[in-house]
Image (cartoon, rainbow, N blue to C red):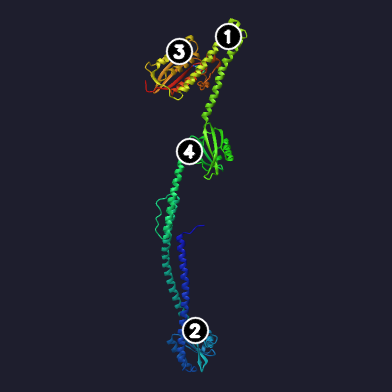
Amino acid sequence: MKMKKLFTQIFVSYLLLLIFTIFILAAYELDVQGKFYKQEVKKDLLARANLAAAILRNTDWGEKQKLDSLTGVLSKHGNVRLTIIRRDGLVLSDSHKDAAQMDNHADRPEIKQALQGKVGFSMRHSYTLKKELVYLAIPFRSHGKISGFVRVAFPYAAFRQSLQDLQYHFLFGGFIVILLTAVLSYITSRRISKPLENIKEGAQRFAQGQFSPPVTEKGTQEIQALANTLNTMAGQLDKRIRTISLQRNEQEAMLRSMKEGILAIDIHERILSINQVALKFFNIEEKDVRKHPVYEVIRHKDMLDFIRRALASKKYLEDEITVTEGKERVLLLHGDVLSDVQGRMIGTLIVMNNITRIKQLDRMRQEFVANVSHELKTPITSIKGYVETLREGAAEDPKTRNRFLDIIARQSDRMNAIIDDLLQLSKIEQRYGKLNIDLQPKELLPVIRSAISACRQKADEKHITIEVECDTRLSALINSPLLEQALVNLLDNAIKYSNAGGRVRVVAETDGQLLRLSVQDWGCGIEKQYQHRLFERFYRVDKGRSREMGGTGLGLAIVKHIALAHKGKVSVKSVPGEGSVFCIELRKGSSN
Ligand code: ADP
């Protein structure tokens, strides 16, 4: 329903009330005035009739001519129509008409009333004069008895005109009064409604969160009190909103800075709060998901199951889930009851820890133990087998015994090599894993030379030549024993996987702030599909061949860790049948 404005309501009510009052008053006054006027006319006519009767008392009503002339004179001076009527209704004389031509008047209402001794009065049509007249008749008595009637008449038009004049004056006056009061009521209505409208605008402003300036309405006592109350309320509201938004900002900042994913759910499974980390875990893009049902936002079955379990159990729960939305992650979920200040359960709070890295490390550790056990198991089994055979009598034959002992020695060397490599790897990881490696500015050529001399014997055995390309002044921030070890491993592989009589090339060069050390051979090369796994521990392309050559599968893993300890990286380029280039890239540091 459309509400009327206060101004319209006051103004229209005022106006209607006024018009109604004026109308009633005017009608009443007109009635009173009309009656009064009628009374006055009646009095006037009565006076004239009495006067005429007094004059006619001394006249003989039988003398028609004399009566007619008197009637004429009295009518002219009295400014009325005068009729003399006999008791039986016969008209004896009339000032405006010949009496002989007039019919009997005994049935006329004024005559009927006069016959009863009263003053007869009527307003009616005159059949004689054919117009509206006001009649007044009085009985004429002689010797105490009614012998006739004196009747005076006055045109009704004049009477009506006077009444209409009166009505017109009243109407005009009423109109002026209405006009004046309309203006007055407009001003009054405005004075009442305007301050209220100003207060309404202020209240609307407050509702939109705009609390200044305050409402300054000076009007009546009540209006001012209303404005004051409104301003006080706005002040309190402003204070409360500020406190709430401050608390909310603090809460959001806390949630944002947390490493854990946080998700609060109400008992109807709607999201109360979710932080950035949790959104990232489930690859959710929408910014405002509050109040949304959780199953519309998170579509992960295990997670939804956990939320439902947490809501149903009403106690602390823990579980592990794997999410594949975006990046694959393993999350450790903690669910606990979310209560309000009265301690009533309002939902559940879920904290998510990303334990992907821990899980990975754990898996790597398990794999590593399995690999080490496997690698050591082979030589141990072999040694055990030969020792048994020797015990069972093979030791008697010197030739067989020597051959077996050679094999046992080779297998022991192999185990030794594996354990050496493992120790070295763990040393690099432990000592330099925290990236606090001891780096010194050192020339590179001596380091390269030292590595080559360590491999010289093996190279000579296969008639392999080793070429070096390195500026004598080239130096960098390095840990020389570690870098030498890495070069030895690369050179050892290059020699191992090159054909006899081949060549190996070691190059050290700079590229801006980068130092690149590469070891190239023209040996068997490596298939593309195996290249990305070469730097894993115990990874070998051809296990049998590597073992035969005394390889442990740890050489390149050691190279990778040495490069990482130098904040550098290692890479390989290789074409099967053409050869390989292994490259270590380090930051040169401040030295040249
Ligand atoms: P390994 O002790 O078996 O040599 P590495 O970690 O040093 O172990 O090397 C891993 C594997 O990478 C080797 O088994 C071999 O298959 C391959 N590889 C390494 N260097 C070369 C190379 N220069 N040419 C061809 N294959 C190589």
User: Relative to the observer, which residue lies in front, 323 or 253?
Assistant: 253
Name the residue type under label 1. Phe
Name the residue type under label 4. Leu
Q: Residues within 10 Å of mark 1 (few under 14, many from 20)?
A: many
Whether residue 466 sits left or right of residue 313 in the image: it is left
Numbered disc in front, either 3 or 4: 4
First-in-chain label (3 vs 4)? 4
Rounded to the nearest whole Å, what is the CA distance between mark 3 and mark 4? 57 Å
Q: Mark on residue 174?
A: none
Rounded to the nearest whole Å, what is the CA distance between mark 4 and mark 1? 69 Å
Q: Residues within 10 Å of mark 2 (few under 14, many from 20)?
A: many
Which residue reaches farthest top?
A: 398
What is the x, y in percent for residue 334? Answer: 54, 36
Q: Which residue is mark 2?
A: 135
Q: Which residue is mark 4?
A: 255
Rounded to the nearest whole Å, what is the CA distance between mark 4 and mark 2? 107 Å
User: Can you say whether 303 is above or below 411 in the image?
Assistant: below
User: Can you say whether 128 is above or below 350 in the image?
Assistant: below
User: Can you say whether 234 is above or below 507 in the image?
Assistant: below
First-in-chain label (1 vs 3)? 1
Q: Quadrant of the C terminus?
A: top left
Q: Which residue is mark 1?
A: 404
Corner quadrant of residue 545? top right
Q: Which residue is mark 3?
A: 454
Q: Residue at x 41, y 58 (%)?
A: 224
